[in-house]
Each structure stands twice: as C-alpha cells, then as structure tokens.
Image (tube, rainbow, N blue to C red):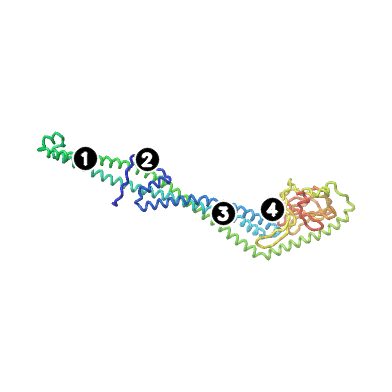
Amino acid sequence: MRRRTRPSRPTAPRTDLRTDLRTDLRRARTRASRPGALLAIVGLVATIVLGAVATPANADAIDDRRKAAERQKSANEKERSDAEEVLEGLEGELGAVSDRLLEVRSQLPAARLAVQEAEAEYAKAKREAAIVAARLQDAREQADDLSATIEADSDESARLREAIGQMAREAYRGGGDVSGVSMVLDADSSEDFIQRADLMSQALRTRAQVLDDLQATESGNRNSAERLEAVQTRIGELKDEADAKVAQSKAAKKAAEDAKAKLDALLAEEKEKQAALLAKKGEITAQLARIEQEARRIESDLRKAIEEQKKRDAERAKDPGDPPPSSGTLFVNPTQTRPIVVTSEYGMRFHPVLRYWRLHAGIDLRDYCGNDVYAARSGTVAWTQYRYGYGNQVMITHGTVNGRSLATSYNHLSSFVVKPGAHVKAGQLIARAGNTGTSAACHLHFEVYVNGSTTNPRPYLGL
C-alpha cells in the first residue's frame, strides 16, 4: 500500500458537501501534495471559467447568425416570387423544377442556421459533460483518500490498543498498579524514593498519552467514515448526472448530424435542380419566346379592336356606372375578393439561374376558382378565347379616356359568361376565375393597356 499523508482531523463531522467551485477548491488544497488531483482541479476551474466566458459570446453569435438567416430567407423568398413570374406561362415541368430550386434556396439559410445551432448545442453539452466528469473524478479521489485514511487510522488504533494491553499485562506481572503507598513503603532511601516517583510519573504520562492518542484516532476514524459516506453519496449523484450529460451530448451530436445531413441533401438537390434547369435553358428560351410572341399578337389584335371601338365611341355615350375620369380611379374591383388583394406586382423580373429578365405585364389579384370576375369598366368585349400562356382570356376595350385608348384583359379564367361584341357595364359579371393556361394556382391575372401597351394597373384601381 502506498504511503499517504494523513490529513488533519476536523473538530466536527462534515455533513454538507456543496458542489460549487469553492468547495472543490478547498478539497483540492487538502490534497495539494497530489499532482494528479491538483491538475484535475485546475482543469475543472479552467473549464468552468472558459465555459462561462464562452457561453454569452456563443449566444450572441447564434443570435447574429439567426438574424442574418432570417434576412437571407426573406431575400430568397422575394427572389423566388420574382423568378416564378419570369417563368409564368411555361409548359411541362420546367416551371416546377425552377420553383423547387428556388424553394430549396429559400430553405438553405434556415438549414445552415440549424446546423450551427445544433453544433453549438453539442459543444455546450460536451463542455458540461467534461465539467461533471471532472467533479466525479475529484469525488472519487476524495473517496480513495478517505478510505486510505480510515485504513491507516484503523491500523493505528489497533497498534494503540495493543500497547495499552501490553501495559496492562506488565502491570499485572508487576503485582498490580503502582500506588503512592507502595512507593513510600518500598523505598530504601530518599534517592530511591525520588527515582521510584519519577518512574511512576513517566508511566502514568505514557499511559495517558496512549489513551489520548487512541481516543483521537478513533474519533478521527469515525469522522472520516462519515465524510466517506457523504462523498460516496455524492459520487452516486454525480454518476447519475454524468450519465445524463453523456446522453444529452449524444442526443445533441445526433441532432447536429441530422441537421448536417438535411443541409447536405438540400445542397445536393439545389445542384441537381440547377443543372436540370440549365440543361433545358434552350427549351425554356423557346417557350418564353413563344409567350412573348403571343403577347405581341395580343397587342396587335387589340390595336385593331381599339380602332373599331373608336368608330363606335362617337355613337355611344359614357356609361354612368364608370368612375369619372377626373377621379384617377378608372376601374372598379374586378374580383369577388374585397378588398382587393395583390399577390404579385407589375414589373420586370430576373431569374437567378437562367439570368433572364422578363416583364410581368399585369398584377395578380387574389381570387378562387369559380369566383365571379367582373368588368372593371364599361366597354365592348373584343374577344373571349384561349391564349397560349394566358389560358382563357377576356379582352374588353373601354374606348378613349382622357385622350388615350383604354383596354383590360382578364386571364387564367375557368369559363366565360359573355361573348365577343357584347357591351358590358362596370361591375358586370363576365367570367369565372380559374387556373387555366400555365398558372400555378387559382387567381386573376389582370392587365391594363393604354394605347395598346401594358401599364401598371395599380393606380387605375386606386391602389
């Protein structure tokens, strides 16, 4: 058995084992002669201090990354919305591939953030597990020290008891205990008396010292046993806590791995969809060119209809149901949805993969399949027909307003209620909303033409 330095005995049993750092440091000082234990405590202190310092910084970094991810997600969603309008009217799976690509891109910021947060949680769990493991090791070393102390004290107690027994046997062999009477009667001279008195005094002091040592040793042993029991209880608690922290660390590691796998899958899908889209760029360009050609054909057909409308204007008075030209709001709500809800604006759109600019020549208004669609202003139905990309379309010419010819078109309709050549009034039912053509969902694509060219419908609707 290796020799250990016996710690000084406390005056009262130790019944409270706090787990805070100050208690750990006091324990370390009682075993400062043991390099391994001291290093363990130093490591424990460093881990606690570094963990306490790093946690707020990590939390701030995560918050900053979360805000950045939210900003990136918003930007990606706007990019996705714009790009969807660029490819509006495409047939087949091209639009779906593009939409999925942009949907994946909108998910990437959140997926990257999830990986960072999961990895930070895993790192935190590992730090906490290391702290608990260090405390558990420290408690086990305390238990080893106390066990060694108890063993040494037990040996010392046995030795002292043997010494006391030996003194008793010697006293018995000498005829009993030494007393002051026998010392006087048996003394031959004063010198002999003094010598006998000195021997008796030494014997009494030795016996008293042995008895004191035995009492102190056994008291210290009881105290050590109580401390050992408390430390062993604490070891059990720390073992349970360490097991929980290990399980938490494993769960955090699994979450980080799952988040990373999801991110990798999204990145792989993004690459795949982008490659698929670029591979069909020629096909997409051809379809977009066909849609643009159809738009030009519509404008050409509309100019002819406007010329015919001008001939009729002189013969037809203004419809009293129309908003006055001076009001600026020339149209009534063409949808059954009230108030009007614009889901996509008029303007140029840019596709981030195809690097293609395209005009979204109207505004999309919220409407549901089968809902009523109304004439925005009185006029003449120029045509009701299916147009490539636009689906079922109603075109109405409204004559000259403020010196400029005006017309409106209603697209992606499910059915027609009016026929070409019919005169309609503002707010009159003309069709039912739908999802025909290459529309992604039920809505009304509403366009306004001034002098035969599209313009933003918003101001004409008072929006």
Q: Give x and y (percent) for residue 59.
A: 54, 50
Instruction: Describe the element under mark 4 as helix, strand or loop.
Output: loop
Looking at the rendered image, the disc whose residue lies closer to the viewer, 3 or 1, is 1
Residue at the image point whose x is 18% and y is 42% from the top = 166
Query: Looking at the picture, which amino acid does disc 2 mark?
Result: Thr
Please report contact status of discs 2 and 3: CB closer than 8 Å, yes or no.
no
Q: Nearer the viewer, residue 326 or 105?
A: 326
Which residue position is annotated with label 1? 205
| Sequence-first tag of 2 and 3 | 2
| Sequence-first tag of 2 and 1 | 2
Instruction: Describe the element under mark 3 as helix, strand or loop.
Output: helix
Query: Looking at the picture, which amino acid does disc 3 mark?
Result: Leu
For mark 4, does the 10 Å Cα neighbourhood hold few (<14), some (14 to 19), or many (20 or more) residues? some
Judge whether 459 appears above or below 178 on screen: below
Q: Is residue 63 left or right of residue 360?
A: left
Which residue position is annotated with label 2? 15
Q: Is residue 257 left or right of residue 326?
A: left
**Marks 2 and 3, how far apart in space?**
48 Å
Query: Looking at the picture, which amino acid does disc 4 mark?
Result: Ala
| Sequence-first tag of 4 and 1 | 1
Question: How many labels, in total?
Answer: 4
| Sequence-first tag of 4 and 2 | 2
Looking at the rendered image, the disc whose residue lies closer to the viewer, 4 or 2, is 2
Q: Give x and y (percent) for residue 339.
A: 73, 46
Residue at the image point whose x is 57% and y is 52% from the top = 64
Judge whether 184 appears above or below 72 on screen: above
Q: Give x and y (percent) for residue 210.
A: 23, 41
Residue at the image point whose x is 76% and y is 62% from the top = 293
Which residue position is annotated with label 4? 441
Which residue position is annotated with label 3? 113
